[in-house]
Image (cartoon, rainbow, N blue to C red):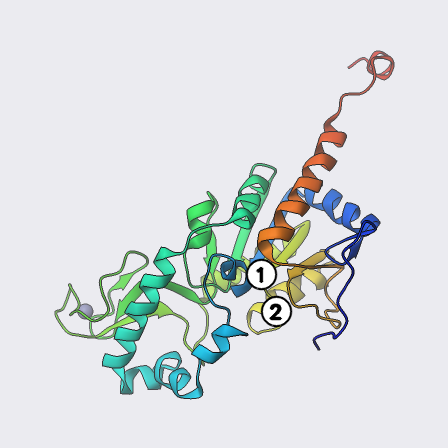
């Protein structure tokens, strides 16, 4: 449930988290050797892409949902749906990374980072060196319903005939409602979640399945989870920490604190101890 109260922002807390807990979280991030970042639409919202709540909710009328977000609707309204996906794809391609993405890039230098995202845009790839696992597929991939050829990225326009077989039968490579995410992507996500030292959930409360199961698997394996989201949730049982804020503000602040935590840990021992320990 969404809370009515707003967490405090003052000298004793950061993004609703008491100062001591914020330092504890930053220490965990600074020391994590294997990190899983699970992101949702809130991460891309700061790049100007609407989330499926708020403004985005108005875009997704029930009629549009049926026409473009289900495979049956796509087949029945294929001309409309292909044109709609082309229009959306152009908007998604124009989106650029923000300070939150750049903070995630900094973390990549500290250890092994796996990115799992619900987002179908490629903004993360613009900012990161790491591979990104798209559990809902990606807008710039496509397959042909006639000849089954697959374009994992840089697909041809959906409104044009398939370059391989010549039929107008292309569909976007996103996971539509009722479809199952790719098994290899889910397997890799679960494996990374269970092996992580820390999970950062960014721009989503991770309540929607099947993605939520990835975060739950990490929690069940004893991995601490932090949720960073501008909507405060009171019942996230799997979240040890919750930062109430947008990715653009909260991620850079957290990474800066983790950087100072790492600097303190890396500080060399005083000469006396180095002499005693013969370093
Ligand atoms: Zn084809």
Tag of residue 256: none
Q: From mark 1 to mark 2, how far is it between C-alphas?
A: 8 Å
For the residues bearing labels 1 and 2, Cβ distance under 8 angstroms: yes
Q: Report the residue at 31% width, 81% height from top.
A: 74
Provide the residue designation for mark 2.
213
Q: Report the residue at 65% width, 68% height from top.
A: 231
Q: Nearer the viewer, residue 63 or 28?
A: 63
Q: Quadrant of ligand 1?
A: bottom left
Q: Can you say which quadrant of the picture contains the C terminus?
A: top right
On screen, residue 174 versus residue 251, left or right, reads left
Q: Position of residue 267 (x, y in %)?
A: 75, 25
Residue 71 seen: yes
Q: Position of residue 245 (x, y in %)?
A: 65, 59
The quadrant holding residue 237 is: bottom right
On screen, residue 230 versus residue 72, left or right, reads right
Provide the residue designation for mark 1.
190
């Amino acid at each position: 449930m969404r809370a009515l109260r707003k967490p405090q922002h003052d000298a004793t807390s950061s993004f609703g988290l008491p100062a001591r807990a914020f330092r504890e979280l930053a220490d965990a991030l600074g020391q994590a050797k294997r990190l899983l970042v699970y992101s949702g639409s809130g991460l891309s919202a700061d790049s100007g892409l609407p989330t499926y709540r708020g403004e985005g909710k108005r875009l997704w009328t029930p009629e549009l949902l049926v026409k473009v977000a289900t495979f049956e609707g796509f087949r029945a309204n294929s001309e409309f749906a292909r044109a709609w996906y082309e229009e959306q794809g152009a908007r998604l391609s124009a989106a650029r990374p923000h300070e939150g993405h750049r903070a995630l890039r900094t973390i990549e230098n500290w250890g092994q980072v796996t990115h799992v995202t619900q987002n179908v845009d490629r903004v993360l790839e613009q900012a990161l060196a790491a591979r990104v696992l798209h559990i809902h597929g990606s807008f710039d991939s496509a397959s042909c319903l006639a000849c089954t050829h697959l374009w994992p990225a840089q697909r041809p326009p959906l409104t044009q005939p398939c370059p391989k077989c010549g039929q107008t039968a292309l569909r976007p490579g996103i996971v539509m409602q009722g479809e199952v995410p790719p098994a290899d992507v889910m397997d890799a996500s679960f494996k990374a979640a269970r092996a992580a030292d820390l999970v950062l959930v960014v721009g989503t409360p991770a309540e929607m399945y099947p993605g939520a199961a990835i975060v739950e698997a990490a929690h069940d394996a004893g991995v601490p989870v932090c949720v960073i989201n501008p909507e405060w949730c009171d019942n996230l049982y799997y979240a040890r920490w919750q930062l109430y804020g947008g990715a653009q503000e909260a991620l850079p602040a957290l990474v800066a604190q983790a950087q100072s935590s790492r600097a303190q840990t890396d500080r060399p021992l005083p000469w006396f101890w180095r002499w005693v320990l013969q370093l």
